[in-house]
Image: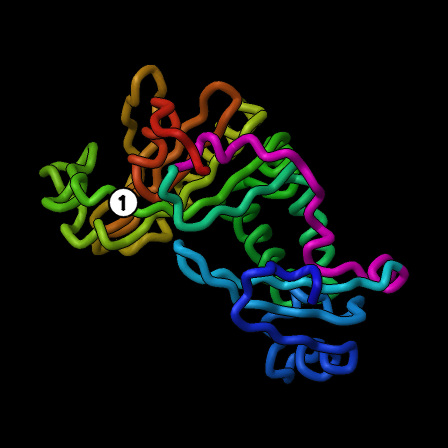
């Protein structure tokens, strides 16, 4: 409890027995929170709700038994510590952010964790790897992930309402099409990665273009990747739906991808102050 924020307005405590009963089994009422509390290795956990001028915050603190934590590492043990630099390239109004150091090694560690603690996730990833190997000749584990050697950041970003209030033009469409006017209400997903092997990533993503386009709704027409020049950088654009365009670009040892071209354009043009 002493490790929780001091300005809390509510708190809850779970003993080791409480964690085992409520968190440590799939039938437990708080099983959803297991990755954050690590019931297998914890001697006790506390959760609090705090309030300030920006809203409400939830904090969790779990006291781990070192021997049990080494024997049965928790979910977040797969994430190595690192000093993040990519938040400086993210949108300042991002709604959510997940940062990873050394994506390839982290993905391997997460897969090992999932195999032991969430076999359904592991089997789903294996099925995806097999399908992409069959349909595109791309092995995610050997062709793409090892090419991402630096840092990766996933973020969810609200769209600029001014860009989508009347519908944004889609490049390469004949006749010209537009994003649905309601697209402004839909945030977009963005991925940034640094220290990438540009040739390797470009080749892998090029081979994935065909299977990805063929997987889309045929009512959208004949979906193909179009090219759009953003400054001196050539981006690849595929319309996924009336509210989403998958866009990616590889430049300066970086990979930028988003479900809205504005996300890639912002990174290329180095606009904004980044995430606080």
**Nearer to us in this view, 143 or 181:** 181
Counting every numbered tag in the picture gives 1
Image quadrant where one finds the C terminus:
top left
Image quadrant where one finds the N terminus:
bottom right
* Placement of 233 over or under 30, stated as above or below: above
Q: Quadrant of residue 247?
A: top left
Q: Which residues are magenta?
A: 67-91
Q: Secondary structure at mark 1?
A: loop
Q: Residue at x 45, y 62 (%)?
A: 56
* Placement of 50 over or under 103, stated as above or below: below
Camera sees residue 242? no
Q: Is residue 4 left or right of residue 261?
A: right
* Placement of 133 over or under 195, stated as above or below: below
Camera sees residue 51? yes
**Nearer to us in this view, 73 or 85:** 85
Q: Is residue 241 left or right of residue 83?
A: left
Single out the residue that lies furthest toward the right.
67
**Nearer to us in this view, 234 or 276:** 276
Q: Residue at x 24, y 42 (%)?
A: 160
* Placement of 82 over or under 135, stated as above or below: above
Image position, residue 43 (x, y; %): 80, 70
The crowding category of the residue bearing disc 1, from other C-alpha atoms within 10 Å (few below 14, some 14 to 19, many at least 20), is some
Residue 90 among those drawn in magenta: yes
Q: Residue at x 60, y 60 (%)?
A: 6
Q: Quadrant of residue 71?
A: bottom right
Q: Is residue 225 left or right of residue 73?
A: left
Image position, residue 121 (x, y; %): 61, 63
Image position, residue 129 (x, y; %): 58, 50
Residue 48 among those drawn in magenta: no
**Nearer to us in this view, 161 or 147:** 161
Circle 1 residue: 159
Q: Residue at x 56, y 30 (%)?
A: 85
């Amino acid at each position: 409890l002493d490790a929780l924020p001091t300005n809390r307005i509510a708190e809850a405590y779970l003993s080791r027995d409480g964690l085992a009963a409520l968190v440590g089994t799939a039938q437990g009422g708080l099983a959803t929170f297991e990755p954050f509390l690590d019931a297998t290795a914890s001697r006790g956990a506390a959760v609090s709700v705090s309030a300030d001028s920006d809203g409400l915050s939830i904090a969790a603190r779990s006291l781990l038994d070192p021997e049990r934590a080494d024997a049965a590492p928790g979910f977040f043990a797969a994430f190595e510590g690192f000093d993040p630099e990519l938040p400086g390239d993210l949108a300042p109004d991002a709604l959510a952010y997940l940062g990873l150091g050394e994506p390839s090694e982290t993905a391997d560690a997460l897969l090992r964790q999932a195999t032991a603690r969430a076999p359904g996730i592991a089997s789903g990833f294996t099925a995806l790897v097999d399908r992409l190997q069959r349909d595109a000749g791309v092995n995610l584990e050997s062709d793409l992930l090892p090419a991402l050697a630096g840092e990766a950041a996933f973020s969810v970003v609200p769209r600029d309402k001014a860009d989508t209030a009347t519908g944004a033009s889609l490049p390469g469409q004949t006749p010209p099409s537009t994003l649905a006017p309601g697209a402004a209400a839909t945030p977009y997903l963005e991925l940034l990665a640094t220290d990438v092997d540009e040739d390797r990533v470009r080749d892998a993503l090029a081979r994935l273009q065909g299977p990805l386009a063929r997987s889309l709704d045929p009512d959208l027409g004949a979906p193909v990747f179009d090219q759009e020049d953003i400054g001196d950088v050539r981006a690849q654009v595929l319309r996924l739906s009336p509210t989403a365009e998958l866009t990616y670009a590889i430049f300066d040892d970086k990979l930028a991808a988003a479900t809205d071209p504005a996300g890639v354009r912002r990174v290329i043009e180095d606009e904004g102050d980044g995430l606080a």
